[in-house]
Image (tube, rainbow, N blue to C red):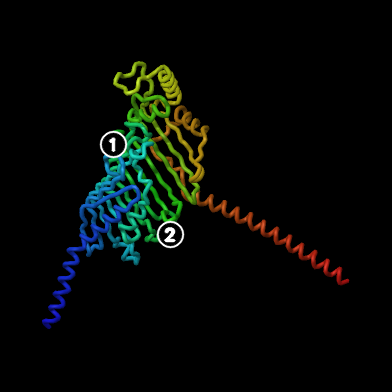
Amino acid sequence: MRKSVKILLGIIVVLVIARLLLPFFVVRYVNKVLADMEGYTGRIEDVNIALLRGAYQIEGMNIQKVNGSVKEPFILLPLTDLSIEWKSLLKGKVVGEVVIHNGEINFAFSNDESASQTGTENDWTQVVKDLMPFEINRFAIVNGQIDLANVIGEAGTDLSMKNFQLQIENIRNVEEKGVRLPSPVKASGDLQGYGGKLNFDADMMLLKQTPDFDYNLSFNNVQLVELNKLAQEYAGIDFEKGTINIYSELAMYDGKLEGYVKPLTKDMKIFKLKEENNKEKKRGVGGFIKELLAEGGKEILENQKKEQVATNIPLQGDVSSVNTSIWPILGGMVRNAYIEAFKAEFDHSVEFGDLFSSSEGEADKNTGATSKKEERQQKREERKQERKERREERKKS
């Protein structure tokens, strides 16, 4: 009896020691994974092990570019929770979930390699696989932040999204719903300094090499004056006031896509006879004429009652080539101005089912064409065989 008790106590002591040492070994393993990345290196501060929950938490992950001049880290994750997804385990599927709290990612764009920080040098999916022993079925970001510096390669063209929320569920299609787009995706965020808000809602099939999806995307109440750097770069004008709302629906099946983008500007003003002295770029004669013409065009195409300029930009094509046409765009602007003002909402004119049906119809046509070709070939072979048999008969006779 005493011997059994001693053995039991010995096992408990070994387990306690192993539990105490486990975080040390996990920290070493994670730091080794982060040190072996291509073009980037990183470290973590600590881990918390939760054996009963089948999880571990990584604290203080900091990833920076090797030989980079950007001060901000590429990825900064104060707390990352990696665990078994129990509701899927109850269905007989061993998959995991990852939840990132208050994470931050900093992109920088530049022709100078040391000042560029985009993450394209490294295979990040492999890093995630090395840190997570199971396939991920749920991925979430809570209160994240995304910063993009020098978006057009020019100082001052920065974009920052705060309060970023992301939820991707059923990535591995554990829940068989009998639908073609089983993975719901939701995202939202505030455009810091631009006064706008992003909302993204989609259903996807993420297990295909080229994912299928059907999404709604909107940017609301973005301040036009905050886009002046971009407007100067690409159009040679700037805005005095106004806001823009953007609505988009897009569906893709087997690489073929269909959708639209609907921009609506409200209370937009481009031309001002005498500009403020505090503007970074002084307007020359060419800029004066451009802005005057743009303002005149805006007045012609503006719905005076709603004080808005809007249109609908149709999108069609595939992943390698997206096409649109100028005439529907101009027609949409005229319609908004003189026939019926566009509404600041989704048109609900894009249906994934229609795209799928048309693709299936094309496949049936192709199959039908192939069948007819095979049928003609078969008849030729039969006639050839008949002629051969007749020749043989004449030889015998």
Question: Which residue occupies the foreground of this view, 284 or 368?
Answer: 284
Give the residue type that dot 1 points to: Gln
Q: Position of residue 196 (x, y in %)?
A: 32, 36
| Mark linked to residue 192 | 1
Question: Which residue occupies the foreground of this view, 5 or 300?
Answer: 5
Give the residue type that dot 2 points to: Gly
Residue 292: quadrant of the picture: top left
Secondary structure state at the residue bearing disc 2: loop
Q: Where is residue 306 in the image (x, y as percent from the top left)?
A: 38, 28
**What residue sits 46% from the left and 27% below the top?**
338
Secondary structure state at the residue bearing disc 1: strand
Residue 374 as seen in the image, left or right of residue 155: right
Q: In this view, does 212 lie above or below 192?
A: below
Q: In the image as oriented, which residue stretches furthest toward the right?
A: 397
Q: Where is residue 228 in the image (x, y as percent from the top left)?
A: 35, 28
| Mark linked to residue 178 | 2
> Could you tell me which quadrant the C terminus lies in?
bottom right
